[in-house]
Image (cartoon, rainbow, N blue to C red):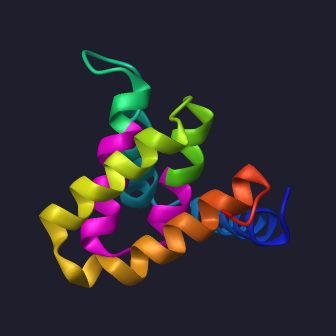
Amino acid sequence: MPDRVAAFNEYRARMNERILGADNKAIKRFFGVDTLTYETGVLDAKTKEMLGLVASMVLRCDDCIAYHVQRCREEGVTNEEMFDIFSVSLVVGGSIVIPHLRRAVEFLDELNGTDGR
């Protein structure tokens, strides 16, 4: 796994453990709702992750984008589907999304073990 992907996963796991270890009821409940939201329901987990990726790109949250790019790959989203997701993000969010699109594609390339060429 590329260094950036491994570093992202390690940091996320370590900080989530730290935050949840504070035993704050509201924070724990919010994290729980977040987890439940992305489980298969009427919509499957793949669709929910794709929606999460669009929302993250429009809201311009690089950590969220990286997380949802990774989860989309885990749910079987293809590179072609990723670029459709990216195009929806651009239409909804406008040109301000372009820098985040660059980082999303770079993270996807790292997950794929390629440089995108």
Magenta span has 29?
A: no
Residue at the (61%, 70%) spot, across then down: 106
Direction from residue 22 to residue 37 in the image, left or right? left
Q: Quadrant of the N terminus?
A: bottom right
Which sits in the foreground, 29 or 70? 70
Taking the view exactly as shown, the residue that stands out farthest to the top is: 42
Residue at the (62%, 65%) spot, across then down: 107
Query: Magenta span covers which residues?
Result: 49-68
**Quarter of the image holding residue 32?**
top left
Direction from residue 6 to residue 62 in the image, left or right? left
Q: Name the chief secondary structure element in magenta.
A: helix
Q: Is residue 20 visible?
A: yes
Image position, residue 68 (x, y; %):
48, 52
**Quarter of the image holding residue 101?**
bottom left
The correct choice, above or below, for 25 with respect to 34 in the image is below
Image position, residue 18 (x, y; %):
67, 68
Image position, residue 51 (x, y; %):
29, 44
Q: Is residue 16 visible?
A: no
Magenta span has 65?
A: yes
Taking the view exactly as shown, the residue that stands out farthest to the front is: 117
**Quarter of the image holding residue 25?**
bottom left
Q: Quadrant of the C terminus?
A: bottom right
